[in-house]
Image (spheres, rainbow, N blue to C red):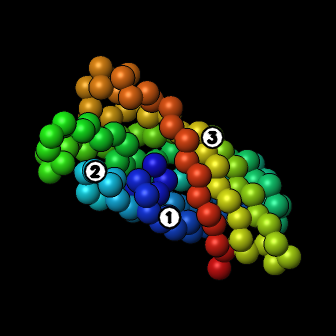
């Protein structure tokens, strides 16, 4: 979800332990996806391992209509997460993001959400500038 599906994400540090985050990508079977929100870290930016919680609003559910890739339904809502950022390398400019995301709200009906599951996993590569 932080990447709008399969895509990219940009974080802007607005306080030592708080990032504003925005992502966009492809939902593959349903066009473009997006998300924006906040990440709150529990350790300072100088640490290699940074656990965090996050909250995003954006694309979180795709209902695939069999036999018609152009009519798939895309829904947005609130997504809550817990995860970590792990930086590596001598200069600490490269890293990985891992999150367990929970779909708190969505425009999709409850039956569709329960069928697909509300808990999702997000993994991403990070490059610091």
Which residue, given by chain and number where applicable, does mark 2 sit on? 29
Residue 26 percent location from the top left of the image? 35, 59
Can residue 54 be seen here? The reply is no
Q: Which one is in front, 37 or 7? A: 7
Residue 95 percent location from the top left of the image? 71, 65
Q: Point out the tag, 1 or 2, that comes first from the N-terminus.
A: 1
| Total numbered circles | 3
Label 2 Cα neighbours within 10 Å, binned few <14 / some 14-19 / many ≥20: some
Q: Point out the tag, 3 or 1, that comes first from the N-terminus.
A: 1
Residue at image position (26%, 57%) is 31
Q: Which one is in front, 96 or 47? A: 96
Is 53 positioned to the left or the right of 37 in the image? right
Which residue, given by chain and number where applicable, does mark 3 sit on? 82
Residue at image position (40%, 55%) is 4
Labelled pair 1, 2 in contact (Cβ < 8 Å) = no
Instruction: Look at the picture and state if 13 lies above or below 121.
Output: below
Label 1 Cα neighbours within 10 Å, binned few <14 / some 14-19 / many ≥20: some
Is 55 positioned to the left or the right of 107 in the image? right
Q: Secondary structure at mark 3?
A: strand
Residue at image position (38%, 28%) is 116
Which of the numbered marks, if any, corresponds to residue 9? 1
Instruction: Look at the picture and state if 118 lies above or below 76.
Output: above
Which of the numbered marks, if any, corresponds to residue 109? none
Residue 109 percent location from the top left of the image? 26, 26
Residue at image position (80%, 67%) is 88
Q: Secondary structure at mark 2?
A: loop
Q: List the single residue furthest toward the right.
A: 90
């Amino acid at each position: 979800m932080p990447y709008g599906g399969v895509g990219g994400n940009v974080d802007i540090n607005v306080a030592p332990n708080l990032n504003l985050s925005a992502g966009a990508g492809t939902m593959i079977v349903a066009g473009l996806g997006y998300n924006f929100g906040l990440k709150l870290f529990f350790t300072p930016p100088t640490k290699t391992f940074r656990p965090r919680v996050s909250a995003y609003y954006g694309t979180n559910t795709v209902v695939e209509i069999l036999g018609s890739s152009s009519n798939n339904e895309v829904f947005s809502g609130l997504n809550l997460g817990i995860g970590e950022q792990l930086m590596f390398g001598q200069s600490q400019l490269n890293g990985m993001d891992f999150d367990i995301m929970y779909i708190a709200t969505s425009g999709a009906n409850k039956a569709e959400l329960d069928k697909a599951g509300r808990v999702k996993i997000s993994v991403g590569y990070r490059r610091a500038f």
